[in-house]
Amino acid sequence: MIHDVIIVGSGAAGLTAALGLAEKLKVLVLAKGSLTGGSTAWAQGGIAAVLDAGDTFEEHIRDTMIAGAGLNRQETVEFVIERAPHAIDRLVELGVPFNMDGNSLHLTREGGHSHRRIVHVDDATGWAVQSALLKAAEDHPNITLLPGQSCIDLITGKHELRYSGSGRVWGVYALDEATGKVEPHTARATIMATGGAGRVYQFSTAPRGATGDGIAMAWRAGARVSNMEMMQFHPTCLYNLEVKNFLITEAVRGEGGRLINPRSGKRFMEFYDAERLELAPRDIVARAIDAEIKRFGLDYVHLDISHQPADFVKGHFPTIYEKLMGIGIDMTKQPIPVVPAQHYTCGGIVIDLNGQTDLPGLYAAGECTESGLHGANRLASNSLLECFVFGEAAAAHILDCWDAFDPPPPVQAWDESRVTNSDEEVIIKQNWTEIRRFMWNYVGIVRTTKRLERAQHRIQMLTGEVEDYYGHFRVSTDLIELRNLLQTAELIVRSALKRKESRGLHYTLDYPKTLPEARDTVLVP
């Protein structure tokens, strides 16, 4: 089956691009695991857009730049924010049932925003968006959705039957999880929409598949990555040993939730940000919680909204209320135990306003990219927005330039003549656990040069082991993910060591000051 464009990833960015392209072209969407396994489905908060009478693009731009600590690219921020109302209109057309306030969309407010500008579907916006996009894609005759595909590497000029050093991207090699066979999928253009790299950390709100695949694949193929040290930690993830990665949305603090030290029973944000308290930007709140936990030897802190009327709490947070009741916590009467957790990858593959990467034929959109929108810290609810805007921009650019794209040449089949089935799956599990633990302890919310160097040393040791294993055994999804996880961890640590200042999400005790000039940390392969 010949496809015009291949998209890797079936979340907001990938499906938005697919729907834009499918008007004229045949599109293949490859997804690792299920079609709803990405981060989009988990987004609780909503989508930021200027829709309120008193609000302006300038103010949304300013809020984004303040959160990004000067590292944002102004033109990108303007580009995305000015296209936000259109993105919302498009989703309404697709049938996303946003909450209404009379005849207009209901807007909520989140930390870092100067206005109410978050459109939402209760506290489960992502799921509604994912469902609407997926239904539209499934109904479209020009879109083929193929789940259960673990992409291994990009196909570039060096994989052509007639070798070429051009670096031109022609598609991907993907492992079919059901058959165990690796197939080359080729097309004139390829879009990476693979999401972030949250699973490199022990505590993360990201879905299990967020192993930095797209970032690692693009890097190995020769694309630059930028600002990988800018890892956002969400301040409030449910602390519960049974329930993993359940996020307590920012909006709980937006609607009056207070952070309490469970030992002293006191609110503590006044010691860290007396003016904004619980509505300070995420990095400040996450560091405050981290400091309280370390100083008092706590496992968690309390987030308490029980002073608000019970109906108000249940009405605003039905999903969270039900989830917590299921484990015996009534948030209308008692506090919620929370810890910070990795939440969003602000750095990634360098792209321009058309979603183009450094490699001809390769585009990227969403969390796997560094577009210049988020800078040193992402503003709440700007992430889904970025997916829609760049998914659409990449599709538009491919359509505009279509006649200039050559058809893909014949490429080499996947070579597994020298490998055998693995007899040592335990190695993968052990290495995975080790990476996530040392990344959490050494490359977490607060960093030091010594800790970063320790992490780098561990990564060097593991890299030899993983490469050796990869060279001898048949690929499996776990092995592909481990290889990508390790590569992404290496990029994060290398970037963190290069930044000799504290800015936004990168906070190091060795360089607590912020330098006068904001510079991106760009790594060149």
Image (tube, rainbow, N blue to C red):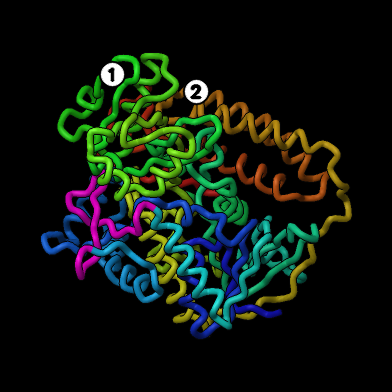
Of the pair 296 and 486, the residue shown nearer to us: 296
- Image coords of residue 515 (percent x, y): 28, 34
Q: Is residue 166 above or below residue 509?
A: below
Q: Does the segment drawn in magenta span residue 114?
A: yes
Q: Tag 2, which secondary structure?
A: helix
Residue 451's tag is 2
Q: Is residue 373 visible?
A: no
Q: Is residue 167 above or below residue 94?
A: above
Query: Which quadrant of the rendered structure holds the N terminus?
Result: bottom right
Three-letter code, disc 1 = Gly
- Image coords of residue 387 (percent x, y): 42, 61
Disc 1: which residue: 265
Residue furthest to the left: 54
Three-letter code, disc 2 = Arg
Q: Residue 235: name its quadrant.
A: top left
Q: State which region is magenta.
A: 101-123
- Does the CB distance between marks 2 and 1 fall below 8 Å? no
Q: Residue at x 34, y 20 (%)?
A: 262
Q: Residue at x 84, y 42 (%)?
A: 422
- Image coords of residue 440 (percent x, y): 51, 29
Q: Tag 1, which secondary structure?
A: loop
Q: Is residue 41 above or below residue 104?
A: above
